[in-house]
Image (spheres, helix red, strand yellow):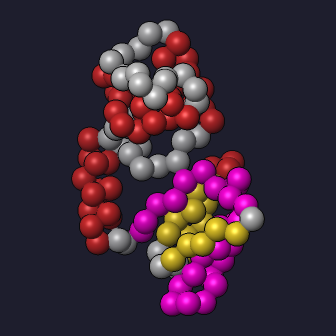
Amino acid sequence: MLRVMLEDSDYCDVPADLMSFEDGVVVFWREGEEVGRHRQARIRALEVLAGRSMGRRIEEARKTYPNAYRGWTQEQEDQLRELFTNQAGKDELVAALGRQPGGITRRLRSLGLLGEDEQLR
């Protein structure tokens, strides 16, 4: 089962065990049959539900980082930009956003605020 996080904080759960990509569309499959499809540009994140190892990993991470593995909302991205621009350090960003340092680093890089060779301090 996959939770597909969509734009506008919308989501849907898809009973899929495989994904494929076709011309900007993600196609979801279960046991060889198509069970759903969404435009790739509309998908913000994917979350594995009830997965054995990943499910436990997510649960454990969320004990310390409540937003770990969740899709970023526009408000969270705006908050990240503001904190980072105001020289917030790694510990302050983690506390304010409830996310793992690696997730924050990746988001900063995808927003063009942190270079590939730079580290979050």
Q: Is residue 29 magenta?
A: yes
Considering depth in this image, is 12 or 45 the residue closer to the camera? Answer: 45
| Whether residue 3 is visible | yes
At which x and y percent is residue 115?
49, 24
Residue 38 higher or lower than 72, as above or below: below
Compared with 66, 3 (above or below) is below
- Quarter of the picture containing the C terminus is top left
- Horizontal side of 64 relative to 17 (left or right) equals left
Tell me the residue at 27%/57% (across/down). 57
Residue extending furthest toward the top: 86
* Residue 23 falls left or right of residue 77: right
Magenta residues, start to end: 24-49
Q: Assign the magenta stretch its main secondary structure.
A: strand
Residue 40 location in percent, x, y?
A: 68, 58
Where residue 84 appears, as percent x and y from the top left, is 48, 17
- Residue placed at 37% from the left, 22% from the top? 120
Whether the magenta-drawn stretch holds residue 93 is answered as no
Q: Is any part of residue 97 visible from this angle?
A: no
Q: Is residue 108 above or below residue 38?
A: above
Residue 60 position within the rendered picture, expressed as x and y whole percent measured from the top left: 24, 53
At 58% across and 30% down in the image, what residue appears?
Answer: 111
